[in-house]
Image (spheres, rainbow, N blue to C red):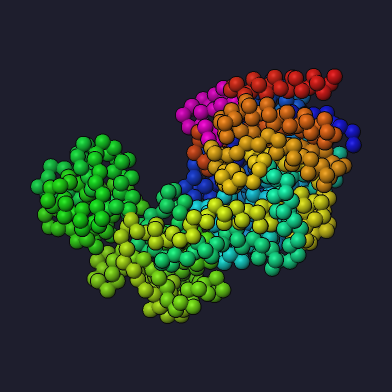
Amino acid sequence: MKLPDLLFGVATSDHQAEAYDPIYADFRDQWEQHQKQTPRGRATDFWNRYPEDIALARDLGCKIFRFSISWSRIEPRIGEFASDMLDHYRKVAEAVLAADMIPLVTLHHFTWPVHVQERGGMTAEKFPQWYRTYVQRVVDAMGELIPYWVTFNEPNLLVYGYVKPWWQPSYLVPPGAAGEKSLSDQLDQSAILIRNMFMAHKLVRTVIRTKNPKAKVGANPFVLGLPGLLQFVIDLVATRTSSAKAFRRHNRRLAEQALLAQTPVDLIICRFTPTRERAAKVAFSHSYAEGVERLVVRKTSQVRAMSDLSGNLVGFARGSIATHTISRLMPTARQQAFSTHRDGLRALQQGKIDGFVADDAALAQAAVPSDLIVLKEVLAESKYAVGVAKGNPDLLSLVNATISSLSDPNRVTPLHPKALRRIRRRGYLRVGIVCDPGEIMSHETTQREVALARAIAKTIFGREDCVRFQTVTLDQRVPLLTSWSRFLEPLLKTASVVGTVLNSNWWHLGMAGKLPEFLCPKECVGQQDYVGLDYYWGIDSFEFDRMHQLIDASMSHFDDAPVDPPGLLRVLARFHRWFPDLEMMIIENGCIDHADGFTRMEYLREHVRGVTQARRLGIPVRGYIYWSITSNREWGLPFGPASDFGLFHIDLDHDPQLKRIATPSAELYKQIILEETATSSS
């Protein structure tokens, strides 16, 4: 085919750039709040300042400006469509055109209305029809203005809202609420999601091209740069998956690792508070109770608040999070760890320390001596969860379901006998707990923990006495949930990625007619007008450490992401072989401030060089769109150098004016566009 002109552009998205408005909150807003992630807040205020950002893109020499539309603003309530919101997005498109740029519109950028989720979300049977109805309104309002459309942003990443890789502490994206479903059910939901997206894409492509037959419609899957043979094997697994049963079998290893589940105890139920460090080693259930930490001092002491302990010695139980509380509230205090709470209280009595920090339940169990006093001030609040070994999702889901059933007696707890076969064969559940259940339990939390363990045993065996308790100290909790096979984790992690369909290029495999029909129906094959892709990270050889960096980068850990500019050319060449008659659009490519020894400027220069090399080889790359025009909210991550991809920097957390400041990368991009445009013209 004739080589098209190369167009450069920049991008933004609704949730990441438009300020939060409670009237039009999307489901991602709810989910970020529930996950305690960084909320978007004002974001970049693109809703009001879009003319400024469009002007910045124009001045760089861009010819494409990508923005997305918030479904939650267009349809705030079921069947009610906001004409003023549609008018606003039309004005954005008109402003792009007035700046001599092409508007590229994304219709679904990782967000959807709360009312859609309440009716079953993206896996609901009627989701494709709901999506078509929304898109029809958008197309009616502005369809003749938009030459390029993206139906689903990075559709392949959306499956990670239904399946959680065993090494991940939490779901990557919403809904992330499969906590009470069996792994088989989760995998079935991910298959339904894939099919629904193909069906919805086909429906809205018809809507768009009915309004504007020249419009080009596609999607932009997130693509990793892998060595050719490795990518071939991963894609081959997907093409050979002939049934839903085979799909479940091939993908189980992504979430389940039986070797890692072989631990000294099955569960830890003893005031275990999830933290980032712990979640890297242990899987946690929903919260079943809450607690508070307080300071204990001698009655004869002058200390009456944490602030009185500057420079003094403060104790805590080894393995508790009290050390973090002390560091946060009184960083000048010296700390001393004790094996048990009783040891710490005894040292306080003897004057060896000046204060002791612990939670209420621990103090009740340890029985605070009469010459000590527990101060009323609450130092910290904690949520307690059950600890489960990583790689054991069905046991975790059963625990979650049991916790829910205790608060709602009418709720039925599902049993997953196949996954719990090892425990059932043993005949009892092994639970690590902080006290001997035979002792008098003096605190409600301790009583609740024993009751929860027995309820879980009853769910598995039909009898609540099929549980053996093991008394543990706080610092034993993580080790007791760590398998002897932990040294194999790097190998298991790599095998989990290589052998699963979900990590293949399944979107473009479907469009090429290489997926089974239960995932991509025949009528959906070939329903795209360009080959879209997002490329950020890659590796050029199979090395375990680089592979792990790549896997972590795909899960939004960017600060150690591996950079492989030649990988972009490999990806473009592969997709060109699959779709020789379609133009290619690099919908996203970009970098944080520094990654893998590359500055953003070096990253940008090298990847654009890959694009020009591809075009010299006859690969019809039509567009290169840098992510992103400005700093933005990177999907719940804390804002900083490790999450800022912007050509124009905005201090999102501290600058009330949200001033756009050009980075050296912006100046370089302007220069690159000028050079490449001149070369293309000549």
Q: Is residue 456 visible?
A: yes
Let me know if residue 622 appears in the view: no
Q: Residue at x 58, y 39 (%)?
A: 561
Q: Find residue 627 and report its image quarter.
A: top right
The answer to whether residue 401 is left or right of residue 195 is left
Q: Is residue 365 left or right of residue 180?
A: left
> Which one is nearer the viewer's eye here, 645 or 140?
645
Q: Residue at x 76, y 58 (%)?
A: 239
Identify which residue is drawn at 50% across, 67% down.
Answer: 395
Is the residue 237 above or below the residue 395 in the image? Answer: above
Question: Which range is magenta?
Answer: 641-661
* Residue 334: % across, % down: 24, 40
Quarter holding the N terminus is: top right
427 within the magenta span: no
Specify the quadrant of the image occupied by residue 620: top right
Look at the magenta stretch and give its main secondary structure. loop
Residue 602 locus on image (x, y percent)? 63, 27
Query: Residue at image x 72%, y 29%?
Result: 608
> Which residue occupies the foreground of this view, 528 or 166?
166
Given the current orientation, which residue lies at the most extreme right position?
1
**In this view of the protein, which residue sits in the foreground, 185 or 539?**
539
| Residue found at the very far bottom of the displayed protein | 463
